Image: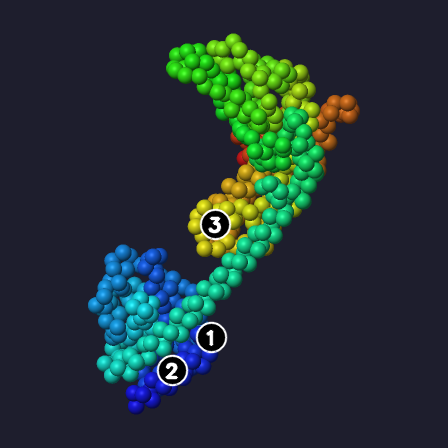
Amino acid sequence: MEKHSYFEATQRLCTSLQLEQSLASYFEYIQLHLPVDGIFINIFQPERKQIQFIAHVNHQQSSTLDQCVFLTDEMCATLNTPDRPVIHIINEISLDPVTEHVAPKILPKIQSVILLRMLCENTHLGVVGFYSKQPRMFRPRHADFIEPHRQPLALITALNLRGRNWLNANYQLSQQNDSLKRTLDSQHGVIGAHAGLKQVMQQVHTIAHLETSVLLLGETGVGKEVIANAIHALSNQASQPFIKVNCGAIPDSLLDSELFGYEKGAFTGAEQRKKGYFEQANGGTIFLDEIGELPLYAQVRLLRVLQNGTITRVGGHESIQLNIRVIAATHRDLQVMVQQGEFRQDLWYRLAIFPICIPPLRQRKSDIPLLVCHALEQLSTKFNLSQLPCIAPEQLDSLSQYHWPGNVRELLNVLERAVIQSPNGPLNFDFLNPIQHTINVSHQPNIIIDPSHANHQLVPLNTMMSHYIRHALCQCGGKIYGPGGAAQLLEINPNTLRSKMKKLGICH
């Protein structure tokens, strides 16, 4: 009888390469001998502190699973105990803390179970559970009947896991292939080089091999530093230093010493000579980001560098000759600053020999899917995710419809927030609700901004100001403070703007 049982069970388990089909055939035979309502298979993953259910069969269906239950350190230690029995009857699952914690999460009605440990090359692979929805259903004779089936069950489980690994490897290869395809849409880290930034990249290729100064113009967050990287990478100085300087982040009192260096003893604390950013970039490229933030006296010294190619360290008298290329960038309108006396006209002419305007993200929304894929690949690595989080088409559409006042930088921050909230996906961007400001002018006169086009029918100044502020808020997606905000757009103090909005009854 025992040999016949083993032979029949093995035959049933070998009926198919699909685990769920083999298990269904096996269950059909087992239920003739045991009072079972179903069978489950799970594997123990101590490195992840979890048990993963991989298959389940009952009277209604048979299916593979991919559901995990996390364990405490104590539970992991219990499962790793060498003297844990190979076969274990639990007629009241409350009597076994690990089973009580794990099984009901997948099978809520389970009351009693026989656990058959699977060992493969002395490794605890997991268990096969024969369960009932009624308590106290199993006897030692039931355990004796299924104990010989332990090795065939372990073998088909191991083969199934190996097959899953192959599928996972193929999936990862597919993802890598997709990633490689996406790199065709980028050049030197510029996503959208053949789409929304195609014209920009044409200008980059035109100027890269020359030594001419370049001025990058564009809103905050559009990727000016990325374009600067591309220019340097394509230049003849690609193997030389590339020094990046945020002009707005250096205190005025340290500008000279940071940019041009200092001699030993030039001031208190100058214990030795130090090279400034310009000298560090000698032979290569220096990227001056936010050039519009430089005070006028620093602009004078920068002009000298551009004109003569020399610098003088703080506390020094010798002129140091440099061979350096300057790439400057700003989100400000330098021509307006020249008119207002905030930026030197001669420096503007020197910098703007070859200006490159980088369009905002809202003007190149075709790049958004590429940027999303690229960012998710980086975030998956950052957060050690097993696969890329998925995005429903309607959620991707919501990203394309958003105004993006913060441009690519804002998009990256939004994606990171979504991944943190749902690391396994699907990603949701419902928190990204642009504030819409609708101006109802159906019963009001047209607002004329340019006085040369105005007629004798003028409107009150407060009405004009109210509509203009609303328009600015709409342009900025409702943002008031910070880069890309309405206050910056209107060149007004944010607190002053708030005060005017309150006075004019503009809700926000």
Q: Which residue is mark 2?
A: 10
Q: Is residue 247 above or below residue 312?
A: below
Q: Are marks 1 and 2 in contact (CB under 8 Å)?
A: no
Q: Which residue is mark 1?
A: 18
Give the SS element for disc 3: helix
Q: Are marks 3 and 2 in contact (CB under 8 Å)?
A: no
Q: Which residue is mark 3?
A: 380
Q: Quadrant of residue 347?
A: top right
Q: Where is residue 180 drawn, in percent x and y?
A: 58, 51
Q: Are marks 3 and 1 in contact (CB under 8 Å)?
A: no
Q: Is residue 173 above or below residue 4?
A: above
Q: Is 198 situated left or right of 418 in this image?
A: right
Mark drawn on residue 218: none
For the residue marked with disc 1, what is the amino acid? Gln
Lower position in the chain sequence, tag 3 or tag 1: 1
Observer able to see residue 219: no
Give the SS element for disc 2: helix
Q: Is 281 situated left or right of 215 in this image?
A: left
Q: Is 6 situated left or right of 275 in this image?
A: left
Lower position in the chain sequence, tag 1 or tag 2: 2
Bin the neighbour count of mark 2 within 10 Å (Cα to Cα): few under 14, some 14-19, many 20 and up. some
Q: Is residue 199 above or below residue 469?
A: below
How far apart are the two marked residues, 3 and 1, measured between alpha carbons? 31 Å
For the residue marked with disc 3, what is the amino acid? Ser
Bin the neighbour count of mark 1 within 10 Å (Cα to Cα): few under 14, some 14-19, many 20 and up. some
For the residue marked with disc 2, what is the amino acid? Thr
